[in-house]
Amino acid sequence: MITLGIESSCDDTAAAVWCSERGLLSSVVSSQDVHVSWGGVVPELASRAHHQTITDTVEHALERARITVKDLDRVAVTEGPGLMGSLLVGLSFAKGFSLSHNLPIVGVNHIDAHLYAAFIEHGPEFPFVGLIVSGGHTRLVRVDAPFVHTLLGETRDDAAGEAFDKTGKMLGLPYPAGPEMDRLAREGDPEFHAFPRSMIREGLEFSFSGLKTSLLYYLEEQKEEYVTKHRADICASVSAAITDVLSVKLERAMEQTGIRSVVMAGGVSANSMLRKRCRAMADRLQTALWIPSPEYCTDNGAMIAVAGAMMDSLERGRVQRGVGIRPYARMPR
Ligand code: KG4
Ligand code: ZN
Protein backbone atom coordinates (compact mmCIF):
# COMPACT_ATOMS: atom_id res chain seq x y z
CA MET A 1 0.00 0.00 0.00
CA ILE A 2 1.39 3.37 -1.02
CA THR A 3 0.33 6.54 0.83
CA LEU A 4 0.90 10.16 -0.19
CA GLY A 5 1.18 12.38 2.90
CA ILE A 6 0.49 16.13 2.69
CA GLU A 7 1.31 18.62 5.46
CA SER A 8 0.53 22.36 5.47
CA SER A 9 -0.46 23.23 9.05
CA CYS A 10 2.02 26.05 9.65
CA ASP A 11 4.93 27.37 7.59
CA ASP A 12 6.24 24.24 5.87
CA THR A 13 4.64 22.81 2.74
CA ALA A 14 5.51 19.12 2.76
CA ALA A 15 4.69 15.94 0.90
CA ALA A 16 6.02 12.39 1.21
CA VAL A 17 5.41 8.91 -0.14
CA TRP A 18 5.28 5.99 2.28
CA CYS A 19 5.11 2.36 1.22
CA SER A 20 3.90 -0.10 3.88
CA GLU A 21 6.28 -2.77 2.58
CA ARG A 22 9.35 -0.76 1.48
CA GLY A 23 9.25 2.17 3.91
CA LEU A 24 9.77 5.83 3.05
CA LEU A 25 10.16 6.43 -0.70
CA SER A 26 10.45 10.23 -0.60
CA SER A 27 10.02 13.26 1.66
CA VAL A 28 10.03 16.83 0.36
CA VAL A 29 9.78 19.86 2.65
CA SER A 30 9.51 23.37 1.28
CA SER A 31 10.11 25.83 4.13
CA GLN A 32 8.72 29.35 3.82
CA ASP A 33 11.37 32.05 4.33
CA VAL A 34 8.84 34.86 3.76
CA HIS A 35 8.26 35.05 7.55
CA VAL A 36 11.88 35.69 8.61
CA SER A 37 11.74 39.47 8.13
CA TRP A 38 8.56 39.61 10.27
CA GLY A 39 10.12 37.68 13.16
CA GLY A 40 7.29 35.13 13.25
CA VAL A 41 4.73 33.35 11.07
CA VAL A 42 2.27 35.69 9.32
CA PRO A 43 -0.82 33.49 8.68
CA GLU A 44 -1.96 35.22 5.50
CA LEU A 45 1.52 35.01 3.95
CA ALA A 46 1.74 31.35 4.99
CA SER A 47 -1.51 30.45 3.16
CA ARG A 48 -0.33 32.21 0.00
CA ALA A 49 3.05 30.51 0.10
CA HIS A 50 1.41 27.08 0.56
CA HIS A 51 -0.77 27.84 -2.42
CA GLN A 52 2.25 28.68 -4.56
CA THR A 53 4.30 25.61 -3.67
CA ILE A 54 1.92 22.74 -2.93
CA THR A 55 1.56 21.40 -6.49
CA ASP A 56 5.34 21.37 -7.09
CA THR A 57 5.99 19.85 -3.66
CA VAL A 58 3.62 16.94 -4.31
CA GLU A 59 5.01 16.45 -7.84
CA HIS A 60 8.57 16.35 -6.48
CA ALA A 61 7.57 13.82 -3.84
CA LEU A 62 6.11 11.51 -6.52
CA GLU A 63 9.13 12.01 -8.81
CA ARG A 64 11.64 11.29 -6.06
CA ALA A 65 9.70 8.18 -5.07
CA ARG A 66 9.87 7.14 -8.75
CA ILE A 67 6.16 6.49 -8.88
CA THR A 68 3.17 8.00 -10.66
CA VAL A 69 -0.25 8.91 -9.34
CA LYS A 70 -1.55 5.55 -10.56
CA ASP A 71 0.66 3.74 -8.01
CA LEU A 72 -0.94 5.54 -5.05
CA ASP A 73 -3.46 3.76 -2.79
CA ARG A 74 -4.50 6.65 -0.55
CA VAL A 75 -3.92 10.26 0.42
CA ALA A 76 -3.30 11.32 4.03
CA VAL A 77 -3.55 15.01 4.90
CA THR A 78 -3.15 17.15 8.02
CA GLU A 79 -6.62 18.22 9.20
CA GLY A 80 -5.48 20.20 12.31
CA PRO A 81 -4.48 21.69 14.63
CA GLY A 82 -2.82 24.60 12.87
CA LEU A 83 -3.42 27.85 11.03
CA MET A 84 -6.86 27.70 9.44
CA GLY A 85 -5.84 29.26 6.11
CA SER A 86 -2.78 27.03 5.82
CA LEU A 87 -4.74 23.88 6.68
CA LEU A 88 -7.40 24.77 4.12
CA VAL A 89 -4.83 24.99 1.30
CA GLY A 90 -3.50 21.48 2.05
CA LEU A 91 -6.95 20.02 2.65
CA SER A 92 -8.50 21.53 -0.48
CA PHE A 93 -5.57 20.33 -2.57
CA ALA A 94 -5.78 16.83 -1.08
CA LYS A 95 -9.56 16.63 -1.56
CA GLY A 96 -9.30 17.72 -5.21
CA PHE A 97 -6.39 15.33 -5.78
CA SER A 98 -8.26 12.40 -4.24
CA LEU A 99 -11.45 13.13 -6.17
CA SER A 100 -9.72 13.50 -9.53
CA HIS A 101 -7.62 10.34 -9.07
CA ASN A 102 -10.31 8.38 -7.28
CA LEU A 103 -8.21 7.80 -4.15
CA PRO A 104 -9.46 7.42 -0.57
CA ILE A 105 -8.45 10.29 1.71
CA VAL A 106 -7.81 10.23 5.45
CA GLY A 107 -7.42 13.24 7.76
CA VAL A 108 -4.55 13.14 10.26
CA ASN A 109 -4.07 15.02 13.52
CA HIS A 110 -0.75 16.87 13.26
CA ILE A 111 0.24 16.59 16.93
CA ASP A 112 -0.47 12.86 17.14
CA ALA A 113 1.35 12.40 13.84
CA HIS A 114 4.59 13.80 15.30
CA LEU A 115 4.82 10.68 17.50
CA TYR A 116 4.35 8.38 14.52
CA ALA A 117 7.44 9.93 12.89
CA ALA A 118 9.29 7.43 15.11
CA PHE A 119 7.90 4.64 12.91
CA ILE A 120 9.59 6.02 9.78
CA GLU A 121 12.96 4.60 10.84
CA HIS A 122 12.20 2.49 13.92
CA GLY A 123 9.43 0.37 15.38
CA PRO A 124 8.67 1.58 18.90
CA GLU A 125 7.07 -0.93 21.23
CA PHE A 126 3.65 -0.30 22.77
CA PRO A 127 2.85 0.85 25.34
CA PHE A 128 5.13 3.88 25.29
CA VAL A 129 5.30 7.29 26.92
CA GLY A 130 5.29 10.01 24.25
CA LEU A 131 6.74 13.48 24.67
CA ILE A 132 5.64 15.87 21.92
CA VAL A 133 7.59 19.11 21.92
CA SER A 134 6.80 21.45 19.04
CA GLY A 135 6.35 25.13 18.32
CA GLY A 136 2.76 25.18 19.58
CA HIS A 137 2.45 22.15 21.87
CA THR A 138 4.18 20.41 24.75
CA ARG A 139 2.41 17.22 25.76
CA LEU A 140 3.15 14.03 27.63
CA VAL A 141 0.93 11.13 26.58
CA ARG A 142 0.60 7.49 27.39
CA VAL A 143 0.17 5.47 24.18
CA ASP A 144 -1.18 1.97 24.82
CA ALA A 145 -1.74 1.03 21.19
CA PRO A 146 -1.72 2.92 17.89
CA PHE A 147 -3.91 6.02 18.38
CA VAL A 148 -4.99 4.98 21.86
CA HIS A 149 -3.59 8.03 23.64
CA THR A 150 -4.14 9.26 27.21
CA LEU A 151 -3.00 12.77 28.04
CA LEU A 152 -0.69 12.81 31.09
CA GLY A 153 0.23 16.48 31.11
CA GLU A 154 0.61 19.51 28.87
CA THR A 155 1.81 23.09 29.04
CA ARG A 156 -0.28 25.67 30.84
CA ASP A 157 1.13 28.53 28.75
CA ASP A 158 3.97 28.61 26.22
CA ALA A 159 5.14 25.50 24.39
CA ALA A 160 8.81 24.46 24.58
CA GLY A 161 9.39 25.56 20.96
CA GLU A 162 7.76 28.89 21.71
CA ALA A 163 10.12 29.29 24.69
CA PHE A 164 13.12 28.74 22.39
CA ASP A 165 11.71 31.08 19.73
CA LYS A 166 10.73 33.90 22.10
CA THR A 167 13.91 33.88 24.21
CA GLY A 168 15.99 33.55 21.02
CA LYS A 169 14.23 36.57 19.55
CA MET A 170 15.13 38.55 22.69
CA LEU A 171 18.74 37.58 22.06
CA GLY A 172 18.53 38.86 18.50
CA LEU A 173 18.33 35.50 16.75
CA PRO A 174 16.29 35.12 13.53
CA TYR A 175 12.93 33.29 13.49
CA PRO A 176 12.57 30.42 14.22
CA ALA A 177 15.24 30.79 16.88
CA GLY A 178 15.27 27.15 18.09
CA PRO A 179 17.84 25.77 15.62
CA GLU A 180 20.15 28.81 16.07
CA MET A 181 19.88 28.58 19.88
CA ASP A 182 20.87 24.94 19.56
CA ARG A 183 23.91 25.82 17.43
CA LEU A 184 25.09 28.63 19.74
CA ALA A 185 24.39 26.64 22.92
CA ARG A 186 26.93 24.01 21.83
CA GLU A 187 29.69 26.64 22.26
CA GLY A 188 28.40 27.97 25.59
CA ASP A 189 28.33 27.09 29.28
CA PRO A 190 24.93 25.68 30.37
CA GLU A 191 25.71 26.64 33.99
CA PHE A 192 26.60 30.26 33.18
CA HIS A 193 23.29 31.55 34.61
CA ALA A 194 20.52 29.66 36.44
CA PHE A 195 17.23 30.48 34.69
CA PRO A 196 14.04 29.23 36.38
CA ARG A 197 12.82 25.65 35.95
CA SER A 198 9.11 26.29 36.54
CA MET A 199 7.01 23.51 38.07
CA ILE A 200 9.95 21.09 37.92
CA ARG A 201 9.41 19.67 41.41
CA GLU A 202 6.08 18.02 40.88
CA GLY A 203 3.48 16.93 38.39
CA LEU A 204 3.47 16.37 34.67
CA GLU A 205 2.28 19.82 33.62
CA PHE A 206 4.63 22.40 32.12
CA SER A 207 5.00 26.17 32.27
CA PHE A 208 7.54 27.99 30.11
CA SER A 209 6.24 31.56 30.05
CA GLY A 210 8.25 32.58 33.14
CA LEU A 211 11.47 31.89 31.28
CA LYS A 212 11.10 34.80 28.88
CA THR A 213 10.20 37.19 31.74
CA SER A 214 13.25 36.01 33.63
CA LEU A 215 15.48 36.50 30.56
CA LEU A 216 13.95 39.95 29.99
CA TYR A 217 14.90 41.08 33.52
CA TYR A 218 18.32 39.48 33.22
CA LEU A 219 19.04 41.25 29.92
CA GLU A 220 17.86 44.59 31.32
CA GLU A 221 20.44 44.29 34.10
CA GLN A 222 23.36 43.50 31.78
CA LYS A 223 25.45 45.74 29.56
CA GLU A 224 25.05 45.18 25.80
CA GLU A 225 28.72 44.24 25.30
CA TYR A 226 28.45 41.67 28.09
CA VAL A 227 25.40 40.07 26.46
CA THR A 228 27.12 40.03 23.06
CA LYS A 229 30.23 38.46 24.57
CA HIS A 230 28.26 35.80 26.43
CA ARG A 231 25.48 35.14 23.88
CA ALA A 232 26.48 31.48 23.55
CA ASP A 233 26.59 31.05 27.35
CA ILE A 234 23.13 32.59 27.71
CA CYS A 235 21.77 30.37 24.92
CA ALA A 236 23.27 27.33 26.64
CA SER A 237 21.78 28.36 30.01
CA VAL A 238 18.30 28.93 28.53
CA SER A 239 18.53 25.60 26.68
CA ALA A 240 19.60 23.87 29.89
CA ALA A 241 16.55 25.25 31.74
CA ILE A 242 14.15 23.97 29.04
CA THR A 243 16.00 20.65 28.72
CA ASP A 244 16.03 20.07 32.49
CA VAL A 245 12.27 20.53 32.80
CA LEU A 246 11.47 18.31 29.83
CA SER A 247 13.78 15.48 30.85
CA VAL A 248 12.73 15.52 34.53
CA LYS A 249 9.03 15.41 33.59
CA LEU A 250 9.66 12.65 31.08
CA GLU A 251 11.42 10.58 33.73
CA ARG A 252 8.54 11.25 36.15
CA ALA A 253 6.00 10.10 33.56
CA MET A 254 7.97 6.87 33.17
CA GLU A 255 8.05 6.36 36.95
CA GLN A 256 4.32 7.06 37.34
CA THR A 257 3.23 4.82 34.47
CA GLY A 258 5.89 2.15 34.98
CA ILE A 259 6.40 2.19 31.19
CA ARG A 260 9.96 1.67 29.99
CA SER A 261 9.56 2.67 26.36
CA VAL A 262 9.68 6.29 25.23
CA VAL A 263 9.14 8.25 22.02
CA MET A 264 10.18 11.88 21.81
CA ALA A 265 9.04 13.90 18.80
CA GLY A 266 8.23 17.36 17.43
CA GLY A 267 10.55 20.15 16.29
CA VAL A 268 12.23 20.66 19.69
CA SER A 269 13.24 16.99 19.82
CA ALA A 270 15.80 17.94 17.12
CA ASN A 271 17.62 19.87 19.88
CA SER A 272 21.05 18.38 20.51
CA MET A 273 21.19 19.11 24.26
CA LEU A 274 17.74 17.57 24.80
CA ARG A 275 18.58 14.49 22.71
CA LYS A 276 21.84 13.98 24.64
CA ARG A 277 20.17 14.43 28.01
CA CYS A 278 17.32 12.04 27.22
CA ARG A 279 19.67 9.43 25.77
CA ALA A 280 21.74 9.54 28.99
CA MET A 281 18.55 9.16 31.05
CA ALA A 282 17.37 6.24 28.92
CA ASP A 283 20.74 4.51 29.34
CA ARG A 284 20.66 5.06 33.11
CA LEU A 285 17.12 3.68 33.40
CA GLN A 286 17.63 0.98 30.78
CA THR A 287 14.76 2.37 28.79
CA ALA A 288 14.14 2.07 25.07
CA LEU A 289 14.11 5.60 23.66
CA TRP A 290 13.09 6.41 20.09
CA ILE A 291 13.77 9.84 18.65
CA PRO A 292 13.29 10.43 14.92
CA SER A 293 16.23 11.79 12.90
CA PRO A 294 16.17 15.61 13.07
CA GLU A 295 14.52 16.00 9.62
CA TYR A 296 11.54 13.96 10.85
CA CYS A 297 11.31 15.83 14.18
CA THR A 298 10.33 19.08 12.49
CA ASP A 299 7.21 19.28 10.30
CA ASN A 300 7.26 16.85 7.38
CA GLY A 301 4.89 14.90 5.15
CA ALA A 302 6.36 11.50 6.04
CA MET A 303 4.86 11.50 9.54
CA ILE A 304 1.45 12.34 8.03
CA ALA A 305 1.75 9.51 5.51
CA VAL A 306 2.84 6.97 8.15
CA ALA A 307 0.15 8.01 10.65
CA GLY A 308 -2.52 8.06 7.91
CA ALA A 309 -1.54 4.59 6.70
CA MET A 310 -1.65 3.21 10.25
CA MET A 311 -4.96 4.87 11.09
CA ASP A 312 -6.56 3.70 7.90
CA SER A 313 -5.44 0.09 8.17
CA LEU A 314 -6.30 -0.15 11.88
CA GLU A 315 -9.54 1.85 11.67
CA ARG A 316 -8.32 3.67 14.78
CA GLY A 317 -8.05 7.25 15.92
CA ARG A 318 -10.32 10.14 15.17
CA VAL A 319 -10.55 9.15 11.53
CA GLN A 320 -12.17 11.71 9.23
CA ARG A 321 -12.54 10.64 5.64
CA GLY A 322 -13.53 11.98 2.24
CA VAL A 323 -14.39 15.45 1.07
CA GLY A 324 -16.24 16.09 4.35
CA ILE A 325 -12.99 16.34 6.35
CA ARG A 326 -13.13 19.57 8.34
CA PRO A 327 -10.05 21.46 9.55
CA TYR A 328 -9.64 22.60 13.17
CA ALA A 329 -7.34 25.22 14.66
CA ARG A 330 -7.01 23.71 18.16
CA MET A 331 -6.28 20.28 19.53
CA PRO A 332 -9.63 18.54 20.24
CA ARG A 333 -10.20 17.61 23.90
O1 KG4 B 1 7.17 20.48 15.06
P1 KG4 B 1 7.56 21.78 14.46
O2 KG4 B 1 8.42 21.75 13.22
O3 KG4 B 1 6.30 22.65 14.12
C1 KG4 B 1 5.19 22.69 14.95
O4 KG4 B 1 4.35 21.76 14.88
O5 KG4 B 1 5.15 23.65 15.76
O6 KG4 B 1 8.29 22.59 15.61
C2 KG4 B 1 8.82 23.86 15.37
C3 KG4 B 1 9.52 24.32 16.62
C4 KG4 B 1 9.98 25.76 16.54
O7 KG4 B 1 9.63 26.39 17.74
C5 KG4 B 1 11.49 25.63 16.40
O8 KG4 B 1 12.21 26.72 16.92
C6 KG4 B 1 11.74 24.37 17.19
O9 KG4 B 1 10.67 23.51 16.87
N1 KG4 B 1 13.02 23.74 16.84
C7 KG4 B 1 14.05 23.63 17.70
C8 KG4 B 1 15.09 22.98 16.98
N2 KG4 B 1 14.65 22.73 15.72
C9 KG4 B 1 13.36 23.19 15.66
N3 KG4 B 1 14.18 24.00 18.98
C10 KG4 B 1 15.35 23.75 19.58
N4 KG4 B 1 16.40 23.16 18.97
C11 KG4 B 1 16.31 22.75 17.68
N5 KG4 B 1 17.35 22.15 17.09
ZN1 ZN C 1 4.60 20.14 14.03
Image (spheres, rainbow, N blue to C red):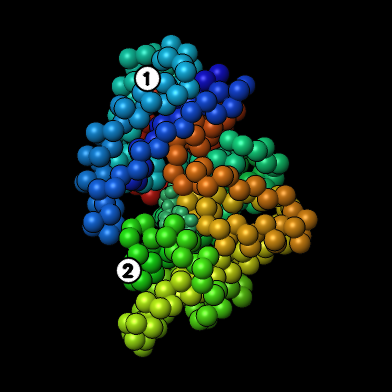
**Left or right of 25 on screen, residue 176:** left
* 82 or 222, nearer to the observer: 222
Residue 328 appears in view: no
Which mark, by number, is residue 163?
none
Image quadrant in which you'd find residue 96 = top left
Residue 85, x across and y down, in percent: 26, 41
Q: Are marks 2 and 1 in contact (CB under 8 Å)?
A: no
Amino acid at circle 1 = Ser
Q: Secondary structure at mark 1?
A: helix
Q: CA distance from mark 2 to mark 1?
A: 44 Å
Question: Which residue appears at 32% of the width and 14% of the height?
Answer: 100
Residue 126, x across and y down, in percent: 70, 42
**Left or right of 319 on screen, residue 30:** left
Label 2 crowd bin: few (<14), some (14–19), many (20+), radius 10 Å:
few
Provide the residue designation for mark 2. Answer: 172
Label 1 crowd bin: few (<14), some (14–19), many (20+), radius 10 Å:
many
Amino acid at circle 2 = Gly
Image quadrant in which you'd find residue 104 = top left
Residue 83, x across and y down, in percent: 31, 46
Q: Secondary structure at mark 2?
A: loop
Q: Say if 223 sits above or below 168 in the image.
A: below
* 301 or 94, nearer to the observer: 301
Question: Which residue appears at 63% of the width and 59% of the height?
Answer: 276
